[in-house]
Image (cartoon, rainbow, N blue to C red):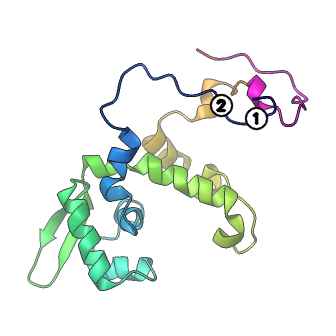
Amino acid sequence: MPGSLAPEPAKFKVDFETCPVQASLGVLGRRWALLVLRDIALYRAQRFNEMMRLTPGITKRTLAMRLRELERGGYIVRAEVRRHSTRWAVTEKGEDVLPVLMALVWFGSKWHAGEVFADGRSRSLREIFDESYIRRVLGPLPHEAGPRPIRASSTVAGFAPTSSPAPAVS
């Protein structure tokens, strides 16, 4: 479609029985689930009351349900259980969601900066996280692999970019 920003449809190398995104959203797609996982994985909140403070609007009942669902799904474990308290920790599966959470931090910081920051100015991941943390979660940063090529589909309403496309890096 001329002037479209939409990329070509993905060309998958394998056939899926079901969509991997849909499968991943089973537990993670539930309301509050990603925020509860964020509390444990990014903010390192380990206790129920810490998570209640970090997640305004969530009820105790909903937090308890999401913790159970995330535990059953293998994203978190009870690291310590005492008579009246439990400490939670992320599992390897939960750690694998960190790049998704970081992508949402980036997206929200870019496209919802007016809600996220007092000055309304968007921020890059480097302005939000320590670079060593970004590398640990994401691996090499995209710009380190070379510039992103500008595709013909990147033109808007027939206007081509002013710079020439960068060569693709293999």
> Looking at the image, which residue is at 34% across and 29% down?
16
For residue 166, side relative to residue 137 (left or right): right
| Quarter-of-image position of residue 30 | bottom left
Tell me the SS state at disc 1. loop
Q: Amino acid at mark 1?
A: Ser
Q: Amino acid at mark 2?
A: Pro
Using the image as rendered, state which of residue 56 and residue 3 is in the foreground: 3
Q: Which residue carries the number 2 mark?
A: 7
For this orientation, the residue located farthest to the front is: 1
> Looking at the image, which residue is at 68% across and 58% down?
111
Label 2: how many Cα within 10 Å (few below 14, some 14–19, many 20+): few
In percent of width and height, residue 161 lies at 87, 30
Examine the rendered structure and indicate whether residue 116 appears above or below residue 150: below
Q: Main secondary structure of the magenta part?
A: loop
Using the image as rendered, state which of residue 9 and residue 146 is in the foreground: 9
Q: Which residue carries the number 1 mark?
A: 4
Examine the rendered structure and indicate whether residue 90 appears above or below residue 67: above
In percent of width and height, residue 14 lies at 37, 21
Split into 4 quadrants, where in the image is the C terminus? Answer: top right
Split into 4 quadrants, where in the image is the N terminus? Answer: top right
Tell me where the magenta segment starts and ends, as one range.
150-168
In percent of width and height, residue 109 lies at 64, 59
In percent of width and height, residue 41 lies at 36, 59
Using the image as rendered, state which of residue 117 and residue 65 is in the foreground: 65
Label 1: how many Cα within 10 Å (few below 14, some 14–19, many 20+): few
